[in-house]
Image (cartoon, coloured by chain):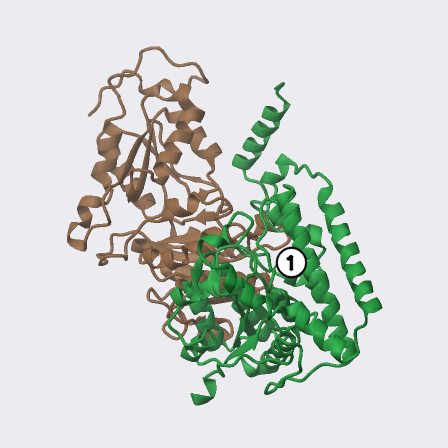
Amino acid sequence: MTVTMGEALNRALHDAMATDERVVVFGEDVGRLGGVFRVTDGLTAEFGEERCFDTPLAESGIVGTAVGMAMYGLRPVVEMQFDAFAYPAFEQITSHVAKMRNRTRGLLTLPLVIRIPYGGGIGGVEHHSDSSEAYYTHTPGLTVLTPGTVADAYSMLREAIALEDPVIFLEPKRRYWSKADVELPTRTEPCRTAVIRRHGADATVVAYGSMVDTALEAAAAGTEEGYDLEVVDLRSLAPFDSETVAASVRRTGRAVVVHEASTFGGYGAEVAARLSEECFHYLEAPILRVGGLDVPYPPPMLEEYHLPNVDRILDAVSRLQWDEAPAAAPSGDGLVATRVGRTGP
Amino acid sequence: MLELVPLEEPACLINPDGSPSTAIGLTMPDDGELVGLYRRLVAARRFDRQATTLTRQGRLAVYPSAGGQEACQVGAALALRPQDWMFPTYRDTVAIVTRGVPPVEVLSLLRGEWHCGYDPRHWRTAPQCTPLATQALHGVGLAAAARRSHDDTAVLVFLGDGATSEGDANIALNFAAVFEAPVVFFIQNNQYAISVPLSRQTKSPTLAHRAIGYGLPGYRVDGNDVVAVRAMVARLLDEARAGGGPAVIEAVTYRMEAHTNADDASRYRSPDEAESWVERDPLIRLETYLTDRGLLDQPRRDDIAAAAERFARSVREALSVDVVPDPASLFKYVYEQPTALLLSEAAWLTEEQELPS
């Protein structure tokens, strides 16, 4: 069955609501309209206004009331219409959603999901294309998930709704229309783990959300240039599955971290720092980041200059000091020296 | 919409001089209840002073006093039924204690031991909220969920005059109105947001008038008349519970003390101003009324004072016990299961603690 990511998300919401009557869906335009991206299409018609409804237009109100509903035993799944429109809810998310379990020593938990379409690449005008993940990953208590495939969109959202912890569920909006052959319902790997999407021996490309497909394209193109790239899809930004990612980097000895968000202070910096700490003796080169420019998100006519793409990923790969590697293999399991002395393309 | 315009004169059942008054829709409770309210007020004031003393002694990190506002907090908390929830702020410790939560648990936050020391679900009392007005939305959400389940639960949200300027206060009023949620917003207008007077918060004739814009009824009550506060909050909670929708109450009162022990009120208000509110003291007026009615004689007064003294001593003793929170507990309640990152930090912290100093 061919489904888009948007349809998979819609089906996940539908199935969660059908399975658990405590699940309620609300936000702006999610009712009769079915959401501006149609992710909630048909839910009000099937489950009624009590289960899927429109709220007044205030994101802080949407998240704040979701907190109260979760306190009373419901499992709210709320939609923020666009990434940058979630900022009015920032205080509720950071001061309450993230902290309620901790504040009450586990006596009050908040099983709720905040869905946020994020990222650019759709020609959106100002405030419609932010990659705001680092704000959330820097907040202890939040689980931050982002699917990169259609099957994951379904499976990870179902899992997110079932978790007892609050989840920031970041949906790569430029992939809403990506298609895949998937039989739904489906269950993929546990949502808080990273998955290797492509095995390769030369370098690890760490990506998430919209950049998973871009990284896979880069890996495919890289073969023509003589690179055998491994692609890791993080899926969960918080918690960070360092075990899977570090194991990959120890095998390949090189890593590039890719995201749409501005590079400075971005999530990639955390990934690079952690991998450096955990894989230092296996590394042939410093870990490089390929991120957006450190500018406010550009207008549509300029966004192509901002966003990472295949060429930029391969350029970073080519800068992984292929010529400068020492001749002697580093200490370790001996699996890391495969590229020593290689001459670049 | 005319019916939404509040009466400017705050409703009052006992005048500042202790003489009885009347207010539309509010009735004087029976004698037993009146004496009970007095007993609670005396205990509340004694508790508040004890907490202030404990702060001076270093037993509490900080204490925002409810001095002068005891009638608001006692009256509002006693208006709740067991199935109702309340959403207090950091200044509402007296209300939470009045609800029955053990003082040593309530003071956990201000003691610096842990953020919320009591079980919110058991006491149907949300954690004391510091970011102003943010908890109002939680109250609205909980009320909406209760209504959806056809439960007999209403919600009382505590706000201050300063908090009414926050976005979340306004969003909460609007969401409550649109959701027809069973919520009563109880605004203690104590005239100051730390140092900033009400005149710098709003151009509304009164805070009760703010309700009109949301299509909600607004009411004013004399916040130093515990009898009127209790009667009004109870009535509006009952109406909300019966499907009458939300309401806003402005309780007009005065913060007799500084914002907290760390504040210096003499920098922004004159002693004369506070002095003028002494004449409207919530305790003295009820005492006068009860004495005039022959419901309170000296032996009974002494009994009540002695009970309050015993209560204060129990608070003092409970707070005098040194507590040493376990650093390992830092990692315990961040997620349902600690993440690999937290486990490694916990192990590292344990190792650090075991190092010889």
Residue placed furthest toward the right:
B299
- Left or right: A318 as drawn, with respect to A275: left
Q: Quadrant of the N terminus of chain B?
A: bottom left
Chain assigned brown: A
Residue placed furthest toward the top:
A328
Q: Nearer the viewer, residue A141 or B198?
A: B198
Residue placed furthest toward the front:
B272
Report the residue at 53% width, 50% height from top: A99
Circle 1: residue type? Pro
- The residue at which mark 1 appears reads as B120
Residue placed furthest toward the left:
A301
Report the residue at 46% width, 45% height from top: A139
Q: Nearer the viewer, residue B355 or B47?
A: B47
- Left or right: B83 as drawn, with respect to A26: right
Q: Is residue A334 above or below residue A53?
A: above
Q: Is residue A78 above or below residue A202?
A: below
Q: Is residue B187 above or below residue A344?
A: below
Q: Is residue A261 visible?
A: yes
Q: Nearer the viewer, residue A73 or B204?
A: B204
Kind of element beneath mark 1: helix
Image spot of residue A20 (x, y percent): 57, 64
Rendering colour (chain B): green
Task: Read off the chain for label 1.
Answer: B
Image spot of residue A260 (x, y percent): 29, 45
- Left or right: A179 as drawn, with respect to B133: left
Q: How many marks on residues?
A: 1
Image spot of residue A112 (x, y percent): 51, 58
Q: Quadrant of the C terminus of chain B?
A: top right
